[in-house]
Image (cartoon, rainbow, N blue to C red):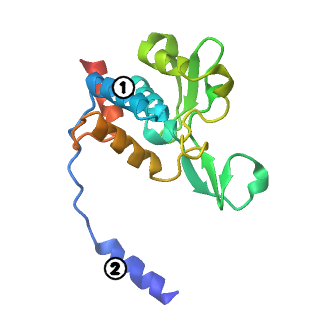
Amino acid sequence: IDDCFRADTILGKIRFKTPPARTSVMTVEHVDAIRQAAHATGFPSVALATVLQFELTMRQKDVVGEWEPCTNKDNGGITYKDTRWVNGLVWTDIDDHFVLRKKHTKTGFEVEHDLKLHPALLEEIERVPADKRVGPMIISEATGVPYKARKFTERWRKVANAAGIPKTIWNMDARAGAITEAYD
């Protein structure tokens, strides 16, 4: 199609300046404040997700999951309209010895975390009743299913605001903060 070739040629010549790397990092004090505010405002999923991201240096989509287009709902899983929830943590990712195994979506590498080494994370897990530890770990309190699209980020920011976290600190900074903590 001629217009597609023309568009490809034009776009192939355009160069965009890469934005500078973020320098904001989340600290353990930020995580503790978010956990406290999340429970105070009735959103324990935000507390659990944040501590998972921070303690295990995981990306949001590896913890919360994401919704991908699907054409065949007969393949199972959690679906909504024409999408399927994928990549998030599920309770069966944790074995009987409290070892979490997960394949990272970006790298494809399988990682293993001994959760017994992370007291704050164990505290959050203990807050979830045993009979509720089925399916996705991070569930929207409003809908009872995994968060849709940007809803988790919006909810996280509201909780972070209630915790007094500066606007310069984003949810994605949990992983960078964890890496900084590890180096320190």
* Residue occupying image coordinates x 28% and y 72%: 14
Instruction: Please name whichever residue, 26 or 6, is drawn nearer the observer in this view of the structure.
Output: 26
Please provide percent x and percent y for residue 62. 50, 38
Does 58 appear above or below 148? Answer: above
Report whether residue 57 is seen.
Answer: no
**Would you identify the image quadrant in which residue 35 lies?**
top left
Q: Quadrant of the C terminus?
A: top left
Instruction: Please name whichever residue, 38 or 25, is drawn nearer the observer in this view of the structure.
Output: 38
Instruction: Please name whichever residue, 80 or 102, is drawn nearer the observer in this view of the structure.
Output: 80
Please provide percent x and percent y for residue 97. 62, 11
Q: Nearer the viewer, mark 2 or mark 1?
A: 1
Does 165 appear above or below 121? Answer: below
Residue 10, numbered label: 2
Amino acid residing under circle 2: Ile
Q: Is residue 42 left or right of residue 37?
A: right
Please provide percent x and percent y for residue 42. 46, 34
Does 155 appear above or below 43? Answer: below
Farthest bottom residue in view = 2
* Residue occupying image coordinates x 50% and y 36%: 63
* Residue occupying image coordinates x 57% and y 23%: 128
Report whether residue 101 is seen.
Answer: yes
Disc 1 marks which residue? 36
Residue 28, numbered label: none
Give the CA distance from mark 2 to mark 1: 51 Å
* Residue occupying image coordinates x 23% and y 44%: 167
Amino acid residing under circle 1: Gln
**Would you identify the image quadrant in which residue 82 lies?**
bottom right
Please provide percent x and percent y for residue 131. 68, 24
Q: Is residue 104 left or right of residue 26?
A: right
